[in-house]
Image (cartoon, rainbow, N blue to C red):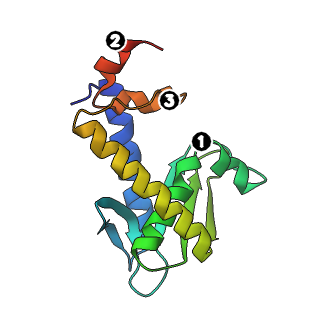
């Protein structure tokens, strides 16, 4: 298992607990952590809705952006792919992404409606299938994961120690 500092674990747990409490209050008819599985790809939708669109939720200290695409092109680049994949698995073309900006005071909740075309979802699904195959090869010991410029992702990687020995 990857090693984490106690501070990182506490921050993660506190943020997750805050996210759970806040969004469960705002979405009382939702189901927390709806599990989706298809073709060897699995995930957990933050808040699933039976008769409405699902919600992916984030709590952040980052300031709201004037253009929401700036947020998704930057730090939350993965959220659109993740939410889009879940929408595919639920046979939906859309979802909502709720981001609670803790600062500046007062905190701000922004909810985005995100929709995908059939072609966009087809392209996204193909990407996810390739990633699945790549991960499977890694788990079978056929290859190491590629280096990433997003070093914060390395902290939770199960092969971090081996990767660090190889160098850049």
Q: Are marks 2 and 3 in contact (CB under 8 Å)?
A: no
Question: Nearer the N terminus, badge 3 or badge 1?
Answer: 1
Identify the residue shown where x is 38% and y is 60%: 21
For the residue labelled by badge 2, is the local secondary structure a helix, a strand or a loop? helix
Badge 3 is on which residue?
A: 148
Q: Position of residue 79 (x, y in %)?
A: 53, 54
Whether residue 95 is visible here, answered yes or no, is yes
Farthest residue in the front direction?
142
Give the quarter of the figure containing the N terminus.
top left
Question: Nearer the N terminus, badge 2 or badge 3?
Answer: 3
Identify the residue shown where x is 40% and y is 28%: 154
- In the visual, does 87 lie left or right of 115? left
Question: Nearer the N terminus, badge 1 or badge 2?
Answer: 1
Badge 2 is on which residue?
A: 165
Q: Position of residue 92 (x, y in %)?
A: 49, 79
Farthest residue in the bottom direction?
51
Q: Position of residue 30 (x, y in %)?
A: 38, 76
Q: Position of residue 87 (x, y in %)?
A: 47, 72
State the residue in front, 117 or 112: 117
Identify the residue shown where x is 61% and y is 66%: 111
For the residue labelled by badge 1, is the local secondary structure a helix, a strand or a loop? loop
Judge depth for marks 3 and 1 and give the one in front. 3
Mark 3 Cα-neighbour bin, 10 Å: few <14, some 14–19, many ≥20: few
Q: CA distance from mark 1 to mark 2?
A: 27 Å
Mark 1 Cα-neighbour bin, 10 Å: few <14, some 14–19, many ≥20: few
Judge depth for marks 1 and 2 and give the one in front. 2
Badge 1 is on which residue?
A: 75
Q: CA distance from mark 3 to mark 1?
A: 14 Å
For the residue labelled by badge 3, is the local secondary structure a helix, a strand or a loop? loop
Q: Are marks 1 and 2 in contact (CB under 8 Å)?
A: no
State the residue in front, 151 or 164: 164
Image height of 159 relative to 96, above or below? above
């Amino acid at each position: 298992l990857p090693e984490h500092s106690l501070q990182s674990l506490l921050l993660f747990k506190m943020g997750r607990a805050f996210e759970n409490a806040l969004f469960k209050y705002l979405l009382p008819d939702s189901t927390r952590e709806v599990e989706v599985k298809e073709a060897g790809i699995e995930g957990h939708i933050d808040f699933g809705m039976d008769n409405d669109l699902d919600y992916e939720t984030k709590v952040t200290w980052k300031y709201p952006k004037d253009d929401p695409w700036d947020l998704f092109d930057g730090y939350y680049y993965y959220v659109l792919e993740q939410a889009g994949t879940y929408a595919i698995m639920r046979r939906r073309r859309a979802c909502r992404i709720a981001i609670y900006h803790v600062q500046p005071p007062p905190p701000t909740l922004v909810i985005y409606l995100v929709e995908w075309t059939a072609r966009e979802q087809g392209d996204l699904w193909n990407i996810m299938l390739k990633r699945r195959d790549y991960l499977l090869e890694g788990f079978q010991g056929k290859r190491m994961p590629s280096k990433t410029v997003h070093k914060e992702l390395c902290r939770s990687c199960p092969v971090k120690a081996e990767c660090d020995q190889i160098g850049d």
